[in-house]
Image: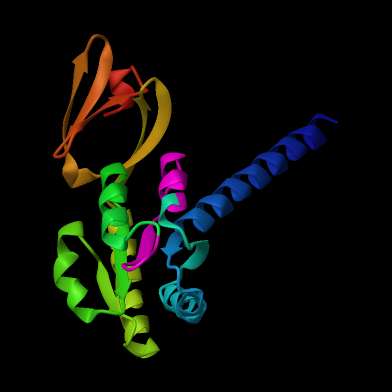
Amino acid sequence: SSETFKTYIALNYLIQSLYILTNRWSEMNSVKIAYCDDDLSYINTLCPVICTAARSVGLQVAFSKYSDGLKLISDFEDGNQFDIIILDIEMPSINGKTLAEKLRQLDNVFSLIFISDNPLEVFDTLRYHISAFIPKEKPMSFCYEELSRVFRELLILRGSLITYDVLVAGEKSTIRLLSNNILGFYMKDKNIIIKTMQKEYLLQERVFKNVI
């Protein structure tokens, strides 16, 4: 009957809406972390602490572990984005500071954490806009407190992040920008350009009212 069909449509709409809301909740409460360190034993020690610290603020962790920084750069260039990147400094293929510099050229939004055997390295890492520096000699209780702080700051940061689809060499790419880093938009040759403090991007969207 028509009433049965209407009920079916309403239930189907409700199920789809719940599915969408569940996915959005999952995305908001998950954090993608890339951890690059050639010291696998320390990775295995720190990862459970990272998960516990994330859960303390209601976040679930999705890990990508790397022992080679060049592979991390390659994945980053392929469009893999991370909320937090943890880098060891002394690594064979590329050291953590050089790696951080290259990654910051691709994305200046992610939270960056350095770990090192040398505590004095902290003074040479500040220019990479780090969120934390963890000496490997520190106890896991110190790591937990620092990681919990970074996760709390990440939750605040997410409220001011905006995602845009842009064109880079004719190919679509997705970027994340802080709202206070955007200086404005302007039209050029029927294209929309977004201007930030660091550079300009060509938006894929060509209808101005859909951007503002």
Q: Residue at x 62, y 49 (%)?
A: 19
Occupied quadrant, residue 196: top left
Quick check: 118 above or below 111?
A: below
- Side of 83 where 134 appears, left or right: left
Q: Residue at x 45, y 44 (%)?
A: 74
Q: In which quarter of the image is the C terminus?
A: top left
Q: Of 202 and 119, which appears nearest the observer? A: 119
Q: Position of residue 45 (x, y in %)?
A: 49, 82
Q: Where is residue 112 in the image (x, y as percent from the top left)?
A: 30, 62
| Identity of the residue furthest to the front in this view | 92
| Identity of the residue furthest to the top in this view | 189
Task: Check residue 64 for magenta coloring.
Answer: no
Q: Position of residue 145 (x, y in %)?
A: 32, 82
Quick check: 105 above or below 100?
A: above
Q: Tell me the magenta residue range.
A: 71-92
Task: Check residue 89 for magenta coloring.
Answer: yes
Q: Residue at x 19, y 65 (%)?
A: 125
Q: Which residue is drawn at 44% across and 75% down?
A: 50
Quick check: 137 above or below 150?
A: below
